[in-house]
């Protein structure tokens, strides 16, 4: 992805993508940088020639970031709070098929580290595995719309989904094969890039497909999903605000005279004992409210001039 930051940002703006997980960034370091068009890339890499992962955010969501976990150059996550909802976005890059088993197991162990219990988790990753077409025996974690046959690496994806109560989102939406294939190289056409989410949040995703016709990545294609966070709005407590009598009106002679007359009439109609100050005070307050009126009790907001 070296040198393609602005091209990536332009594509996200054009496709109306707010959050994007990227792999094989090959940018050394652990930083966040603007890539143009109102997007920011959080990334991690240890070698400028291999691996590297990142998450690109639309600038308006940057202030929602609570935590960044850079586990390795294959796994990183961002925790965001959006409208009171915690969302963990994970970018992953699994070892290729010909890598050592030890390296593959290390990747899955690192992925386990960023799985926040009880919170929404969405993973966008190049898993370098094929979960395959059909879902017999695995209906709880995937749909029927994969590509070709499952391999060992694809089985690892399915096993992880079962262990973490996740769902392989791509496979739930019936699309033409062209919109399911995520990797094309020569005559090879397969599906290795997946989006995963909690099974309980699958209902928040209304669509998922592969975007064709973009040239940002030479062989991989972008997988996009439309997700609407279901926010539980709490009812506001009703607050009783005490209304204040407009005593300042007594400065006006006509108001003061009217108040005296009304108060005299009110006190004449009351049986007040010499030491019954509470009754007298209540008569005064009530007369004041009737004659002088009362404020709404609402606080005036400060006027801001820009």
Image (tube, helix red, strand yellow):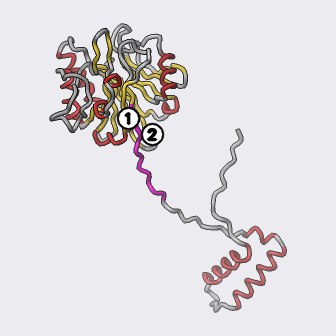
Q: Which residue is mark 2?
A: 82
Q: Quadrant of the N terminus?
A: top left
Residue 29, disc = none
- Magenta span has 234? yes
Q: Is residue 77 left or right of residue 267?
A: left
Q: Nearer the viewer, residue 70 or 155?
A: 155
In what element is the residue under mark 2? Answer: strand
In what element is the residue under mark 1? Answer: strand
Residue projecting furthest to the front: 176
The stretch in magenta equals: 225-236
Residue 207, disc = 1
Q: Residue at x 47, y 10 (%)?
A: 3
Q: Position of residue 117 (x, y in %)?
A: 28, 39
Residue 133 drawn above or below residue 198: above
What is the count of numbered marks?
2
Q: Quadrant of the C terminus?
A: top right
Which of the 4 quarters of the picture holds residue 228? Answer: top left
User: Local crowd at mark 2 within 10 Å, few (<14), some, or many (≥20)?
Assistant: some
Q: Nearer the viewer, residue 249 or 60?
A: 60
Q: Nearer the viewer, residue 91 or 292?
A: 91
Q: Position of residue 58 (x, y in %)?
A: 49, 29
Which of the 4 quarters of the picture holds residue 258? Answer: bottom right
Residue projecting furthest to the right: 253
Q: Is residue 277 left or right of residue 60?
A: right
Q: Residue at x 71, y 72 (%)?
A: 293
User: Local crowd at mark 1 within 10 Å, few (<14), some, or many (≥20)?
Assistant: some
Q: Is residue 273 left or right of residue 184?
A: right
Which of the 4 quarters of the picture holds residue 122? Answer: top left
Q: Residue at x 70, y 77 (%)?
A: 290
Q: CA distance from mark 1 to mark 2?
A: 21 Å
Residue 290 drawn above or below residue 28: below
């Amino acid at each position: 992805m070296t040198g393609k930051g602005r091209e990536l940002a332009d594509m996200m703006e054009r496709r109306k993508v707010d959050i994007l997980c990227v792999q094989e960034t090959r940018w050394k370091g652990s930083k966040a940088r603007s890539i143009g068009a109102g997007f920011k890339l959080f990334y991690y890499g240890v070698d400028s020639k291999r691996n590297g992962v990142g998450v690109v955010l639309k600038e308006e969501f940057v202030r929602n970031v609570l935590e960044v976990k850079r586990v390795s150059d294959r796994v990183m996550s961002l925790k965001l709070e959006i409208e009171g909802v915690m969302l963990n976005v994970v970018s992953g890059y699994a070892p290729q098929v010909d890598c050592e088993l030890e390296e593959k197991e290390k990747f899955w162990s690192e992925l386990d580290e960023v799985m926040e219990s009880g919170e929404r988790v969405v993973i966008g990753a190049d898993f370098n595995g094929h979960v395959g077409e059909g879902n017999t025996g695995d209906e709880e974690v995937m749909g029927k719309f994969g590509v070709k046959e499952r391999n060992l690496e694809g089985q690892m994806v399915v096993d992880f989904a079962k262990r973490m109560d996740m769902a392989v989102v791509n496979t739930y939406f019936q699309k033409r094969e062209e919109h399911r294939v995520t990797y094309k190289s020569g005559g090879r056409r397969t599906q290795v890039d997946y989006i995963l989410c909690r099974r309980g949040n699958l209902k928040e995703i209304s669509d998922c497909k592969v975007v064709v016709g973009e040239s940002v990545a030479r062989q991989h294609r972008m997988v996009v999903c439309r997700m609407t966070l279901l926010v539980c709005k709490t009812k506001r407590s009703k607050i009783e605000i005490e209304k204040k009598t407009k005593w300042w009106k007594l400065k006006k002679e006509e108001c003061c005279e009217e108040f005296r007359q009304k108060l005299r009439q009110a006190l004449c109609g009351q049986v007040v004992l010499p030491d019954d100050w509470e009754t007298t005070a209540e008569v005064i307050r009530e007369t004041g409210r009737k004659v002088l009126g009362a404020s709404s009790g609402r606080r005036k907001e400060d006027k801001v001039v820009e």
